[in-house]
Image (spheres, rainbow, N blue to C red):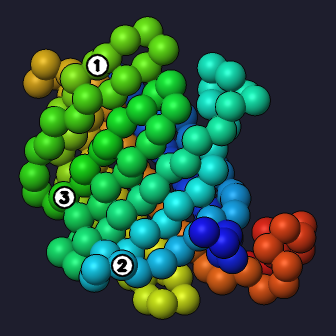
Amino acid sequence: MEEKYILSVEGKQTVDGQSDKIDLQTRASYMMKNGNRYISYTEYDTMNPKQTYRTTIKVSPENIVTVMKGGTEKHNLMLEQGVRHKCEYITGFGMISLGVFTDSVKVNLDDKGGEIKVHYNIDVQSELASVNELTINIKEAVNDVGSYSDIEQS
């Protein structure tokens, strides 16, 4: 797949009142298939920076967001408003079973891109582990996808 889009991901996780934030900006592919929208991009493995893997975000017509991640931290995270799903999270240290309850999902995507906002809670054995916010923006690249100016333009 050609990566003709610019993807921005902002994640915020709050644990015991302490918040951490991540920001990612990279090239991505974006397409519609069988009524679902897909965003796919390459990430570097945290355990082995020379190793890459694909992360794919699937958005169904019902606004169910599924994040499918490969590598040493493999998981499928299903985010559906008002529903608690179980997620098997594979880490370099073994598998962890998590509960994921999604408070809200807001999807505003069209053929040129758009935005996804999700608020969800993660629990371990029904005990709250973290409160999470995820904002995903995808837009067509203005110039050659690899150019620095594409990333800097708003």
Rendering coords of residue 148 (x, y %): 89, 67
Indicate the amino acid at tag 1: Ile
**Residue drawn where x is 18% and y is 75% of the image:** 62
Farthest right residue? 148
Which residue is denoted by mark 3 in the rendering? 80
From the viewer's perspective, is residue 87 above or below residue 119? Answer: above
Which residue is denoted by mark 1 in the rendering? 96
**Residue drawn where x is 48% and y is 78% of the image:** 31
Disc marking residue 33? 2
**Residue drawn where x is 33% and y is 28% of the image:** 89
**CA–CA distance in space, label 2 to label 3:** 20 Å
Secondary element type, mark 2: strand
Rendering coords of residue 4 (x, y %): 69, 76
**CA–CA distance in space, label 1 to label 3:** 20 Å
Rendering coords of residue 5 (x, y %): 65, 75
Residue count near mark 2 (Cα–Cα under 10 Å), binned few <14, some 14–19, many ≥20: few
Disc marking residue 112? none
Farthest bottom residue? 111
Indicate the amino acid at tag 2: Lys
Quadrant where the image shows the C terminus: bottom right
From the viewer's perspective, is residue 61 above or below residue 90? Answer: below
Q: Earlier in the sequence, mark 2 or mark 1?
A: 2
Q: Are marks 2 and 1 in contact (CB under 8 Å)?
A: no
Indicate the amino acid at tag 3: Glu
